[in-house]
Amino acid sequence: MKVNVILLSLLYLVITACSFTTDKSDPDSPRDWVNGQRKEFAHALYLSGQGSALTRDDAKDRARSDLAKQFEVALKEHGQQSQTYMSKLVNGETVQSLSQKVSRQLLSYTSRTLQGVEIVDQWYDKNRGLYHALAVLSRNRAQHQFRQELQTLDQQSQQRLRQADAETSPLIKAALVHQAIDAQKQRRIVQSSLQVVDFSGRGQPASLSLPELIRSRDTLLKDIDIIPAATGEMSSELVKILSGASAGAGFSIAKTNNADYWLRVQTLLDPVFEQNGWYWLRGTLQINLSDASGSDVGVQRWPLKASSINIERTQQRLLSEVDKLLKNELRNVLLGFALKP
């Protein structure tokens, strides 16, 4: 009798245990990961995310988004540091010229990172009418990708610095150092992602100092004398804007006509037209850089557009647009001229 009781007890325990076991081959079997348990995809080896929705595709998207959140803190922190570091005071105003560019870089890089994410399991809960999906990213695979990218970026920076050492033109030297800086800024984004997937959280620290590279470039820029000039409509306002943007970009404004470069700006505007009580100005902003001998170094154009309820305010808005544009892009454009073939 005791033997029968023992056998019945063991049978009950086996049946009870089986009732809590998940079976991925059975589409109706609940998944352990729905309740936060991940026996198959250990946290030390995988990043994971899960999502639930009324449709299968929405559940997959939410699972990927849930996994992506683990990168958000590191990437947002990097973005804030970059914006704060690049913040500077120009003519009494605080300018954060690279904030939008940094945000775009972070978004782009996060999107590329998530290309390695796999949907490894799905389950439909008939009782609640919900689809569930599990997304995972292999730490080892992601680390390998990130470390390769870091190696490539470091090689690019070192190559640009070697080229800069061999150059005699301060503008070309500054442009090459600037490219090394861009590579190291991108490196910080990759390093932030690597620290997320690296279980130790250390990643691969940089061998180059970004602040030192920036100081080196800025020192080179200070040795470059520029004469700002403007022609055409609103020339007196334009030359003031150009002078401020040039100084904010790090160049020295020449006090005599003996300078390394002339930088000319002009607006090529269509006639003012009125529509529904609003006055519109449209056209093109153009800058020309030429060296001391008068040879053209480069030309850059941007479209312009402004409107308001009177002509004077429209012109002011156009000038404000020019000011913002030059403060944000002048340094990159002028240094880009130096390396054009």
Image (tube, helix red, strand yellow):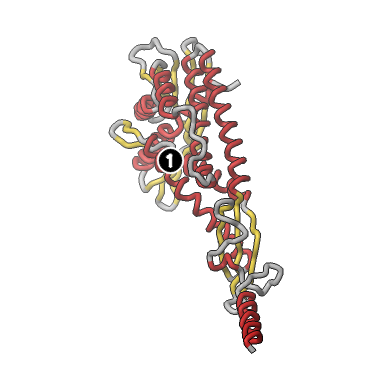
Label 1 is placed on what type of residue? Answer: Ser
Residue tagged by mark 1?
99
Q: In which quarter of the image is residue 226?
A: top left
Picture quarter with the N terminus: bottom right
Picture quarter with the C terminus: top right
- Closest to the observer, 145 or 169: 145
Query: What is the x, y in percent for residue 330?
Result: 45, 29
Q: In which quarter of the image is residue 54?
A: bottom right
Residue at 58 percent across and 65 percent down: it is 33
Query: What is the x, y in percent for residue 231?
Result: 42, 24
Residue 90 vs 27, above or below: the answer is above
Query: What is the x, y in percent for residue 73?
Result: 45, 49
Residue 35 makes an appearance in the image: yes
Element type at mark 1: helix
Say few, some or many: other residues with alpha carbon within 10 Å of mark 1 (under 14 / 14 to 19 / 20 or more).
some
Relative to 331, is 159 on the left or the right? right
Residue at 49 percent across and 28 percent down: it is 207
Residue at 64 percent across and 75 percent down: it is 18
Residue 140 vs 302, above or below: the answer is below
As drawn, the residue found furthest toward the front would be 2
